Amino acid sequence: MLALSPARLLAIWESGVRRHPIDRALLLFALAEPARDPDTLADAPLGVRNAAIMALREACFGSPLPSWADCPACGERMEFELASSMLPPRPETPVDEIRIGDLRLTLPTSRHLLLALDADDAEDAAQRLLHACLLDPADDPASMADLLDAAGEAIDAADPWADLSLALSCPACGAPVSASLDIAAYLWDELDRHTQALLDDVHTLAGAYGWSEGEILALSDTRRAAYLERVSP
Ligand SMILES: [Zn+2]
């Protein structure tokens, strides 16, 4: 199912494993859309980035995504299969700006997220993000905190894939549960698991046969599995 070759998978993992999650998401975005100018990726709306990474995930591992969420009321773990069709539809015509009262804001991007990195807490981060999105530098609202709810709703409406979440109902107690999906972190975890398994295979075969990493990565999955069976039946 994985569309990436073992050597390519290992190279992607190596270039992303020590990066911040926001940079990792940009790495996956670049992988998903190689024709897009790399210098523009950080300025794309988060919904555009997330949709590209979702398409990459489906190309690598198929659809749907095995997922889970814990009920905040009773603790029940809900496991479910998430398909992109269950997520809110993306607007056909992306907007350039949103308005909250007299304020004009641009849609949040990866660059805006980076500006909020050293925030003290989640609310401070949300306020910094909102401030970074103001289109007119002369705008300086007295209280960003009072704008957060309205801004969250306006961003959700304009770019519903910026912050993906799914409304569920707990089968045990009936409480409403909001399951959020960080598609970049989700795909990175999958790539990391595949890479760790691949590194285990290289370690085992290099020790048993003395082959180099390159020689082992060049084997087809079928041959690699056949040799592994002989080493550790
Ligand atoms: Zn529950």
Image (cartoon, rainbow, N blue to C red):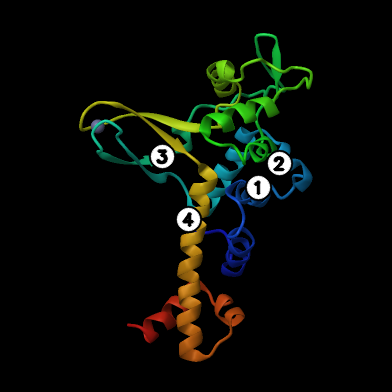
| Circle 1: residue type | Leu
Q: Residue at x 25, y 38 (%)?
A: 75
**Where is residue 214 shown, x and y percent of the image?**
61, 79
Q: Residue at x 48, y 54 (%)?
A: 189
Q: Point out the tag, 4 or 3, that comes first from the N-terminus.
A: 3
Q: Nearer the viewer, mark 2 or mark 4?
A: 2
Q: Is residue 160 rendered to the left or right of residue 132?
A: left
Up the image or down, 223 lies above or below 2; here it is below
Query: Do we see residue 58 in this rendering?
Result: no
Q: In which quadrant of the rendered image does the C terminus lie?
A: bottom left
Residue at the disc numbered 1: 26
Residue at the disc numbered 3: 82
The one of 213 and 20 positioned closer to us in this rendering: 20
Residue at the disc numbered 4: 190
Q: Quadrant of ligand 1?
A: top left
Check if mark 2's residue and mark 1's residue have beta carbons within 8 Å.
yes
The one of 201 and 223 positioned closer to us in this rendering: 201
Q: Residue furthest left?
A: 172
CA distance for labels 2 and 1:
7 Å
| Circle 3: residue type | Leu
Q: Residue at x 50, y 33 (%)?
A: 164
CA distance for labels 1 and 3:
23 Å
Residue at the disc numbered 2: 42
